[in-house]
Amino acid sequence: MLIIAASGMFVQNVLADDTDGLRAIGGMGKGERVLEGGKEAVLFEHKGKGCLSHFWFGGNFKGVEDTRIRYYVDGEEVASIDMDLYMGHGIGFNDNQAPWATKYVGKIGKRNGIFNNYRIPFGESIRVTAQRSKDAEDNPQIWWIVRGVENGRVRLGGVELPEEARLKLIRLENYDAKPLEEFDLCKVDGKGALFQVAIAAKSAKFEYLEACMRAYLGGNQKPLMLSSGLEDYFLGTYYFDTGKFHADTAGLTHFDRKAKSFSAYRFHDEDPVFFQNGLRLTCRCGETEHGLADEKEGYLNPAKTRYTTYTWVYQW
């Protein structure tokens, strides 16, 4: 099996050990300079069927946090996964706290050593690229590792997903929500499962953390309530009164009491949200006292808030 990567001193390998069609695939780059002129560089490319399972990136240069990482699945012209390096790992406001690690994401270096173990399935091919941000240092050195399994599949919530399942990323960036406005993080059709949600938000007041997360399944007008508050959704309480934390299910990656800003991630692997006929996932800018649709007054008077959200969904 041929593994293709960008030019340079990269190591690519396929292990010879083959058990029931499973075969390890992967590639890496060591201190390469492939981002000159802002071009999009191929970090890894593979023909065949399988599932990526690991990504690691290093580079100590100005603007590394906003490096654009893209996954082109099955010959896509527009990448279905297109993320800023830090926000794609649940980190908002370019927060460089380290070291920390969980089973799915982590950050070990001050400005590098960021990784994920997201399962990204593909049926015909996969191509992973990187592109520096327009404000970053030109032609920086970068390091990376990509690994996966040929003929591998994805399990979520103890369930093996269909072979045609594909992971999609839906982004909402720098959205200014009015007090009590309910806005969409994603609205998708068909069958699937919610995998991960990351939110970064900032306001004049922390009362936006009163928001309840809602999932509307199959066009149902009555939502499945996913939380009793926004910090509750990320497993915190009392406006994250104990500060930052990093766990497998959820983590608080940025928290600034003075700036009234936070970022956090939440995984739904052990807490699956499956849907059969579409999913609309929403957040609210603040909340009413009991989170009821017919209540008109905002609890503790939330202010306008700016949000960036990343929602990861498996669809089939």
Image (cartoon, rainbow, N blue to C red):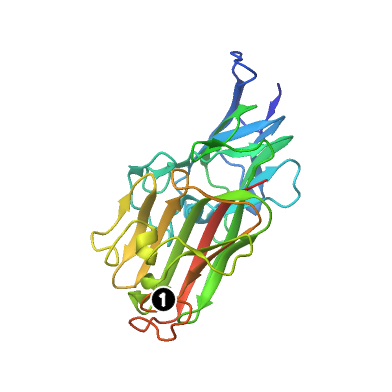
Which amino acid, mark 1? Gly
The answer to whether residue 203 shows anywhere in this view is: yes
If the image is split into quadrants, where does the N terminus sit? Answer: top right
Please provide percent x and percent y for residue 185. Answer: 55, 64
Judge left or right: residue 147 versus residue 301.
Answer: right
- Give x and y (percent) for residue 136: 53, 57
Relative vertical location of residue 9 with respect to residue 205 in this rendering, above or below = above
Residue 69 left/right relative to 260: right
Residue extending farthest bottom: 297
Q: Position of residue 117 (x, y in %)?
A: 49, 38
In the rendered image, the quadrant that contains the C terminus is top right
> Where does the image place residue 280, in percent across and percent down from the top left?
59, 63
Residue drawn 49% across and 56% down? Answer: 197
Query: Mark 1 highlights which residue?
Result: 286
Image quadrant in which you'd find residue 2: top right
Residue 99 placement, left or right of 314: left
Question: Which of the two residues, 119 or 203, is positioned nearer the viewer here?
Answer: 119
Residue at the spot x=73%, y=40% of the render? 74
Vertical position of residue 253 compared to residue 118: above or below:
below
Q: Secondary structure at mark 1?
A: loop
Using the image as rendered, state which of residue 133 and residue 206 is in the foreground: 206
